[in-house]
Every structure is written in C-alpha cells, then in structure tokens.
Image (cartoon, rainbow, N blue to C red):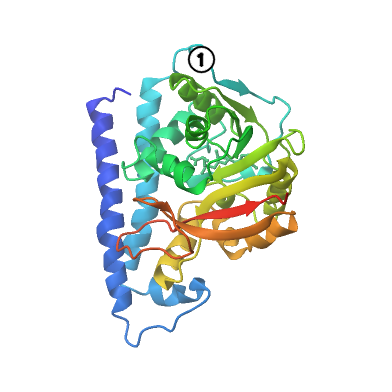
Amino acid sequence: MALSIDDRASLDFVLSLRRHWAATVYPRLRADFDAIDPPPPPVNDAAGLAPLVHGLPTYPWFSWLERGSQKMLWRAVSDAVTREGPLPAAPDGPASVEPDPDLVLPTWYTDWDIHLQPGGVWSHELAGRVYEMGARLVMLGENDDYGFHRLFVETAVPAHPYRRIVDMGCGFGKSAWPLKQAFPEAEVIGVDLALPCLELAARRASQRNLAVRFRQADAVATGMEAGSVDLVTSTMFVHEVPADVLPAIFAEASRLLAPGGVLRFLDFQRTGDGLRDLAMIEHGARNNEPFLPPMIAADLPAMAAAAGLVNARWVAFDERSVGRLDSLSWPRRDEWHFPWAVLEAEKPQ
Ligand SMILES: C[S@@+](CC[C@H](N)C(=O)[O-])C[C@H]1O[C@@H](n2cnc3c(N)ncnc32)[C@H](O)[C@@H]1O
C-alpha cells in the first residue's frame, strides 16, 4: 500500500511508541516488581497481585501507554485506509467467499469494539483492511510476511494427508493461507462472522493463488456435515469467545471431526510468572477483550474432553524461533509478549 508522508509518519510514531512500551516500559515495571521487599509470595491467581502492582511507580505509564497507543494505532490506520479508499473489484482467482445474508451476529460479538478497533472487524466495508494493517503494527511490525502463522502450521499441526480443514475465526485469512500452502491437496475452509474480513481473506488468498473457501458462519454452527473434517484449527480466536459459549465451539469442532481427526487451537495461557500473567489478564480490560480473562480461568482441556475429544492439553509456543514447545513452559523473556500456547486434542478413532 502506498502511504502518504503524513500517514507514514503517524504509523512510524505509533510503532515506535509500542516498541518503547514493550521493550523499555515493561522491563522497568518488572524492575519495580522485583524490588518489592519482601517479595510477594507466589500466587495461583495473578489477579490477587493487582493492588500491589497498581501501586508501582511505572504501572500508570505501562497501563496508559498500552491503551493509549492502541487508540492511536486505530486512528492512524483508519486514516491511512480511508485515504486509500475502497479497493477495485477483486480480480478473479481461485479463492471464494460464501456470505450468509441471514446470519444474525451474536450480541456478545457486536456489543464490544474488540481490540478497541472502532466499529469492530465486522461493521463496515473497510473494517477488514483496517484490521489487517492494525494487526501488522500490533505485532510490532515484525510479522509483515505472516511468519507467525506459518510457524504455527509448520510446528503445531501434524503432517498428514488431510482431506478437509476448517479454520475457525479465520479473520482475514492469516492461518488459512499457510494451511493451504502446507496441505495443497486439502480443501481448506475459513469460517468467520465478519464478512469484510472474509472478503479481504479471499482477495489475499487469490493474490497468492490459493484456492481457499471463506464461509460466513458462527463457529458454533458451521452448517457443515458431521464427521467431514480431518483438522480443525483456530489462531487467536478462543480468547474472543465468552466462556459460556466455548463448550459449543468444542462441541461443533468435535461434531465436524472424523474419527482420528485433529484439533489445534493457538491462544494464550498463564505462565506462572505473576507479573506477566497479571499484565496479560489486564490486557483484556485495556484492549477491550472482555472474554480473555474468563478464557484464561476456564479449563479448556476439560471442555474439549466433555465434547468427546481425547489427549487434550496445552503446550507453549515460542513465536520467535521454534514455535511449538513440548511442555507448558516458556523461555525467559524480558520484554512484554503474549504467552502463546497451543491447545491440542484428537477425536478418538
Ligand atoms: C483476533 S481475530 C483472529 C483472526 C485470525 N485467526 C488470526 O489469527 O489473525 C478473531 C476472529 O474471530 C472471529 N470470531 C469471533 N467469534 C466468532 C464466532 N463465534 N464464529 C466465527 N468467527 C468468530 C472474529 O470475527 C475475528 O475475525
């Protein structure tokens, strides 16, 4: 996308501010925390540390900068995308979109501007492109070629001659594209509620010559045939779903999977580091992601088991290099980052 000098300056400013927040302000908050004397005892529930952490000198900077820079990000991105205007009609290509004009979006979905994106990812024509550009900045500009999602597919998804793959909450297609690249013989279907994201996903897939189907549907009721899918994936999706809806997500994934089918959901988990876990849980409030803390508190492997899946467990994911790790334990990191993790489960034979 060709940016004006003004747009480039705004985006560079926001990106620098976010890098400063992650790489300088968070480590200062850590130093404040480590200097507490006597040190707080280990806690199971990091929320119990909130009164202590909220009193640290760096905390107001850390907290305000997270929310404030996110608001600036959407302003800068929306300005740039609005200035570019609607894209020309999508050229013909192998990807397709299947809108559902009768779909009623759940109110838990429409009531919140998730990630603070004004109007969310669903409510207007440019929403998918605003989300696309914002997502690149949120990853601190280090994921322009979507290596994160490729690493998920390459290291967390077992190699297998899948026939049909469903990617739930596919957004603008970041995980569906590498799934199709890794498993070209499989029919890959991305499912999402947001039509602007699905249209963009199909455009970008066609630009990559990838025959992916993008289907507008609620992941709790995809309308697809039971037992017709070998792999169900999602990335950065389950923390956006209310805890009381999550069992229906697992029930639908389990219904779709054929015997021996595979489920892989990438999201976040607790690390056991109280400060980091509190920062992640409070990210839910600062970034308008109200369902994140309840998802972290919920027992998703138990939900998967209740839906008839087996071997359900979380493992850590390190997006900098190796991707999937063998246990739920992360290498030490000083900067702010999300503790990514993969929920793995299978449908019994
Ligand atoms: C944070 S985005 C992640 C998008 C993509 N998976 C990625 O990794 O970039 C979450 C997506 O889930 C979608 N979503 C939320 N609830 C959904 C539901 N019940 N059914 C289908 N999609 C849903 C949202 O519209 C959004 O596109």
Q: Residue furthest bottom?
A: 38
Q: Position of residue 132 (x, y in %)?
A: 43, 33
Q: Position of residue 329 (x, y in %)?
A: 44, 65
SS at badge 1: loop
Residue 136 shown left or right of residue 155 in the figure: left
Q: Residue at x 71, y 59 (%)?
A: 305
Quarter location, residue 79: top left
Quarter of the rendered image showing ligand 1: top right
Residue at the image point whose x is 36% and y is 23% from the top: 83
**Image spot of residue 73 (x, y percent):** 36, 41
Task: Give the camera-side residue of 349 and 102.
Answer: 349
Residue 125 visible? no
Q: Is residue 93 visible?
A: yes
Circle 1 sits on which residue? Answer: 93
Foreground residue among 12 and 91:
91
Across and down, in percent, residue 180 comes to 52, 30
Q: Residue at x 53, y 32 (%)?
A: 183
* Quadrant that contains the N terminus: top left
| Left or right position of 61 against 317 | left
The total of numbered circles placed on residues is 1
When the figure is inspected, residue 333 is found, relative to residue 19, above or below; the finding is below
Quarter of the image for residue 215 reads top right
* Residue at image coords 39%, 27%: 81
Q: Amino acid at mark 1?
A: Gly
- Residues packed near mark 1 inside 10 Å, few (<14), some (14 to 19) or many (20 plus): some
